[in-house]
Image (cartoon, rainbow, N blue to C red):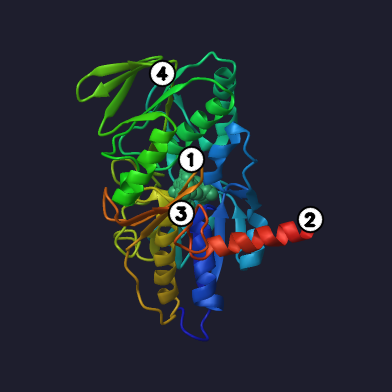
Amino acid sequence: MGTAGARPLNVLIAGGGVAALEAALALRDLAGDRVAVTLLAPGQEFVYRPLKVREPFAGPKTTSYPLRQIAQDIGVRLRSDALKWLDPEARVVHTEGGDELSYDALLLALGARVRPRYRHALTIDDRVLDEQLHGLVQDIEAGYVHKLAFVSPRPMPWPLPLYELALLTARRAYEMNERVSITIVTPEDAPLAVFGEAASRAVSATLEQAGILVLTSTHVEVPAAGEVALYPGGHSLSVDRVIALPELFGPSTPGVPKCDGHGFISIDAECRVHDLPGVFAAGDATDYELKHGSIAAHQADLAAVGIARMAGVAVPQVKFDPELHAILLGGPEPLHLSAHATGEHGSASTASEEPDWSPGAKIAARHLTPYLEAYDARVSGATT
Ligand SMILES: Cc1cc2nc3c(=O)[nH]c(=O)nc-3n(C[C@H](O)[C@H](O)[C@H](O)COP(=O)(O)OP(=O)(O)OC[C@H]3O[C@@H](n4cnc5c(N)ncnc54)[C@H](O)[C@@H]3O)c2cc1C
């Protein structure tokens, strides 16, 4: 299987998000026609999730990219269906639509599931963020809302949106001449601690400038509407509205035995799913605690290397060793943050007004970022 002259390796990628598309693009570059790739995704579009935070604040509509066009560009087959369960012994994926898809190599890039953690808070869901926060923004503009808390469960689902939403809210209130007091309550011991010290310092300065108070190392409960209980200590904050990040869960894919207590898929340092030959996983669906676009893309690149090697391509195996990159919106200028991912506190931390990675997009992905840039240029060239 997979040697020169043999049939191409039959690769199935389940998912249509960052990890899935990054892996498909990486495989095209690494393995060319030694692989025949099928993308199995329920949606019709790839949505650029990080820019969703701008929408409720009169920002531009977030760009979506048709998966059909992407699949055609990359040269992969698209199946508009969803993975239902996996039969690893037969190397077959059963779909929601009742089909059976066989594979030589499978990448699970299924993302995470979001659930509200606090019954009495407004829990954000990026699929409907504009509708969710529209009323809040209107109430701020009308002067009905003066005190807000932005809170996160532990572990934080994604690092950026809590800070961006608080900053964008503060900016909108300032523009409307409304006085609003905003408190962020976070389990981290410093704002965006995963991006390391220099980044945390720069983010703290931006928050201070916006008049936002941050309570760190704090666990939150929301026992009633407008009441935020802070632990340790048990003090409480009284506010007009509580906006919360959701809790994340893994896909709990039937047939994948090694999921942790939250349904995330356990993987090794090469992004292989333990004890399932030929099966890889990448992105928010995995048990790596930090959920972020550059992590998803890095994992997808590692999985692509493993799959290319299965196809007989002589490419050296790479181990998990991610760089984190982010662009924080909501301050006077976008803040570019980078670090080496090393647990709860990144090392080699930097913060600047210009990116120190290239191309400097909000999701740093070796193959996907340049592809999307070229796609955007093509579309704007066609419309001008
Ligand atoms: C508001 C917000 C802001 C963010 N900001 C940033 C940022 O600035 N920078 C950054 O790097 N990251 C950011 N992130 C995090 C980033 O978006 C995620 O880490 C990234 O999208 C994870 O990629 P993924 O491919 O693992 O999952 P996803 O992007 O969630 O994709 C999962 C895919 O799997 C598909 N799928 C689901 N179930 C099935 C099934 N059963 N069968 C087949 N396919 C299935 C879904 O339809 C989807 O296409 C942000 C996230 C949010 C919500």
Of pointers 4 and 1, the one earlier in the residue sequence: 4
Q: Residue 316, image x and y in percent?
A: 36, 78
Q: Residue 246, image x and y in percent?
A: 41, 33
Q: Name the residue under label 3.
A: 109
Of pointers 4 and 2, the one earlier in the residue sequence: 4
- Which kind of residue does numbered mark 1 sit on? Gly
Does residue 249 appear anywhere in the picture?
no
- Decide: marks 3, 2 in contact (CB < 8 A)? no
- Decide: marks 4, 3 in contact (CB < 8 A)? no
Q: Quadrant of residue 138?
A: top right
In 3D space, how far apart are the residues under numbered discs 4 and 3 (Cα atoms)? 32 Å
In 3D space, how far apart are the residues under numbered discs 2 and 1 (Cα atoms)? 32 Å
**Numbered disc 4: secondary structure:** loop
> 155 above or below 45?
above
Of pointers 2 and 1, the one earlier in the residue sequence: 1
In 3D space, how far apart are the residues under numbered discs 4 and 1 (Cα atoms)? 29 Å
Q: Mark 2 points at which residue?
A: 383
Between label 3 and label 1, give the one nearer the viewer.
1
Q: Residue 111, image x and y in percent?
A: 45, 47
**Numbered disc 1: secondary structure:** loop
- Which kind of residue does numbered mark 4 sit on? His
The N terminus, quarter of image: bottom left
Of pointers 3 and 2, the one earlier in the residue sequence: 3
The tag on residue 331 is 1
